[in-house]
Amino acid sequence: MNDFFDHDAERRLIGSAMLGRIEPVDPQMFHDTQHRSIWRAILDLQNRGEPVSPQTISDIMGDKFDDLALLTGYMLYGSSLTANLNAERVRYEYNRRGLIALLENAARQLNKKAPVESIISDLQASALQFAQRADGAHKLTASEVVDRFLDRIAKPRDVWGIRCGIGALDHEFGGIHKNQVVLIAGEPGVGKSIFTTQLGFQMAGVQYWEDQIVERKPGAMYHLEMDESRVLNRAISAYAHVSSHKAMTGKTTDDEQKRWLRAAEIIHDAPVWISDR
């Protein structure tokens, strides 16, 4: 958890605000508690229609903060040209901290032998609350829910979400849906990582499993235990039906090399973004 923050981005964002560019970032997204308090003061000044400067920030914070030199130094970090990039960085690190916290909480419940159904339900509810807080997700009204229900009656279909490309799962769950968390659990070494990697590329249009309906939907993969090259090597090797160990050591036959290179082209063209940070 200690690595999931960027205090330099927070300083630059504060500096940009004092230069006149205030980005829509919730104070809770700042990791540093002092930065959080400073940002609240900045938003307060903005709401009052007052100028944002080291002096006005210090005045509104009162006894909580009186280091004008530090605030003046933050102005040197700021730039109106990069304010949005720093805001995205602060949001990104906040999202990572939140997701890790959700998973750690689920792991603690598993260790306490809590019912799996209860863990999944809590995880889904917490993830939805987190998504709404992090991204300002739109809250549905009752009329919108009714409209969706009537639309499905008028146009009945087995899959109304995004197809995962596995017919049995799509039929059972109706696809993958917005604001939904799908938890895949299993013993170590049973293939959870490679399965979810294949699933991600399958949803992006890569046909891992034959005779399945797939769509070409863009997506992102976040890996906390493998770097990007290992993820891609596994994905390519699985599609080519070539051992990833053989591919990494170069001990492949001519036919395996051709299959692997062809698979690499297909994987490369898939609209999937991979992050290993």
Image (tube, rainbow, N blue to C red):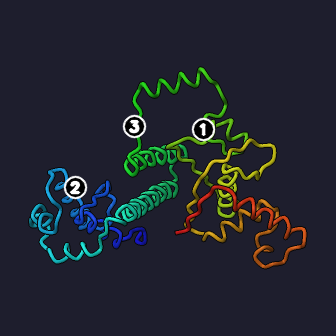
The residue under label 3 is 139
First along the sequence among labels 2 and 1: 2
Q: Report x, y in % for residue 58.
A: 12, 67
Element type at marker 1? Answer: loop
Element class at badge 3: loop
Report how far apart the C-alphas of labels 2 and 1 lie in the structure.
38 Å
Q: Nearer the viewer, residue 68 or 118?
A: 68
According to the image, label 2 marks what residue?
A: 43
- Residue at 74% over, 41% down: 213
Q: Is residue 204 above or below residue 93?
A: above
Find residue 225 and report its image quarter.
Answer: bottom right
**Pointer 1: residues within 10 angstroms few (<14), some, or many (20+)?**
few
What is the quadrant of residue 52 in the picture? bottom left
Amino acid tagged 3:
Lys
Residue at 68% over, 35% down: 171
* Quadrant in which the N terminus is drawn: bottom left
How many marks on residues?
Answer: 3
Foreground residue, 26 or 72?
72
Left or right side of 200 for 252: right
Counting residues from the start of the chain, the first of labels 3 and 2 encountered is: 2
